[in-house]
Amino acid sequence: MPVIRPMHEDDAAAVHDLAVRTFDDLASRRGETPEPRTVPAQAHIRYQHLVRTDPGGAWVAEDGDGIAGCALALLRDGVWGLSLLIVRPELQSEGVGSALLRRAGEYADGARGRIILSSQDPRALRAYSRLGLAAHPCLLANGTPRGVSVPDGVREGTDADIPFTEVVDRHVRGAAHGADIGAMLEMGHTLLIAPERGYAVVIEGALRLMAALDDDGARDVLRAVLAGAGERMVTVEWITAAQQWAVGVCLDAGLELRTNAGAVFLDGDVGPFSPYLPNGAFL
C-alpha cells in the first residue's frame, strides 16, 4: 500500500503527469477521445497554488514507482470543495483513493457546505454519494456558436475586479473564490466582467467559470463567452436542473445538448448555486 503524505509544491509535475494518465485511461475505458491536455506550466500553477493556500487539503500517495495518487481539497469562507482525486490506473479499487479521500475529507471538519464535481466514472459517483452529498446530474452543451453577439457593457477584467467577483460568488455559492481567480489569471485565463451583473473566466474561448447576480445577467455573460469563441468548438459544462437559464442560451447559439456528463454533488449551505457554472479545479 502506498504511503499517504502531505503534498509539496515540487510534487506538481508528477501530479500533473498522473492526472493526464488517469483521465486518458478513463476516456479509453469509456471509448471516448481524451480531452485536450492542459499545458503543464498552467497545471503546475493550479497545484502549487492549492498546496500554498490549503496545505491541510493537499495529499499524495507515494510508492516505489513515485506518486500513485493525489487528493486536493480547498476551503473558502467555510465551504469545502474537492478539487482533484486521482489514482494510478492499476491501483484503482485497491483502497488508495478511499484513503486519500478520507484525508481530504478531514479538511472539511467544521465546514458549513461541501461541493464536489464528479466525472461519469461509476466509482467516483458511488464514493461521493456515500459521503452524504446530494447528486445533481448534469447536461453539457457543445458545438460552434452561431448568431451570438457580445452584449453591451461586457468588458475584460483585471485583478482589480476580483472584489466584485467575490460579491457575486457569495451571492450564488455562499463563498468567494478570491485568490483562486488570481491563480486562473496567472494560468493565462481571461476575466470577463458585466458590471453589477456577473462575470466569467475563459481561456481560448472556452468557459471555465461563470456566476451572476440574476438569470438575465447570467444569460448576457454566457452570450459574451459564446460570442468570443469565434469559430472554435465550445463546451458548456455542469448544467444542472437549476441552470435552466443556460439551456436556452446554448440552444439559441446552435449548441447541442448531451447527457454524457457527470454530476455536481452538494451538501449544506452553498447558497442557491444558481445562476452558476462551476470550475472543475476551484469549484
Image (cartoon, rainbow, N blue to C red):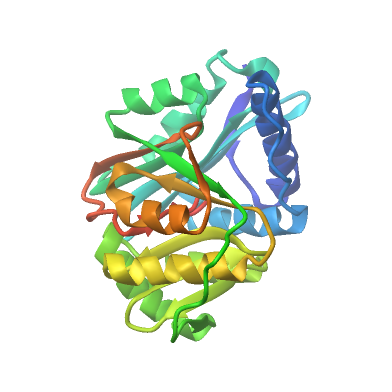
Placement of 73 over or under 131, stated as above or below: below
x then y, percent, for residue 164: 37, 79
Q: Residue at x 78, y 25 (%)?
A: 65
x then y, percent, for residue 114: 31, 44
Of residues 182 and 95, the one nearer the viewer is 182
Residue pushed farthest top?
Answer: 94
Q: Residue at x 54, y 55 (%)?
A: 50
Residue 207, picture quadrant: bottom right
Q: Is residue 114 visible?
A: yes
Q: Residue at x 64, y 48 (%)?
A: 8
Q: Is residue 221 left or right of residue 64?
A: left
Q: Is residue 260 left or right of residue 167?
A: right
Placement of 196 over or under 79, stated as above or below: below
Residue 85, picture quadrant: top right
x then y, percent, for residue 35: 68, 41
Placement of 242 over or under 63, stated as above or below: below
x then y, percent, for residue 99: 49, 24
Of residues 62 and 45, the one nearer the viewer is 45
Residue 129, picture quadrant: top left
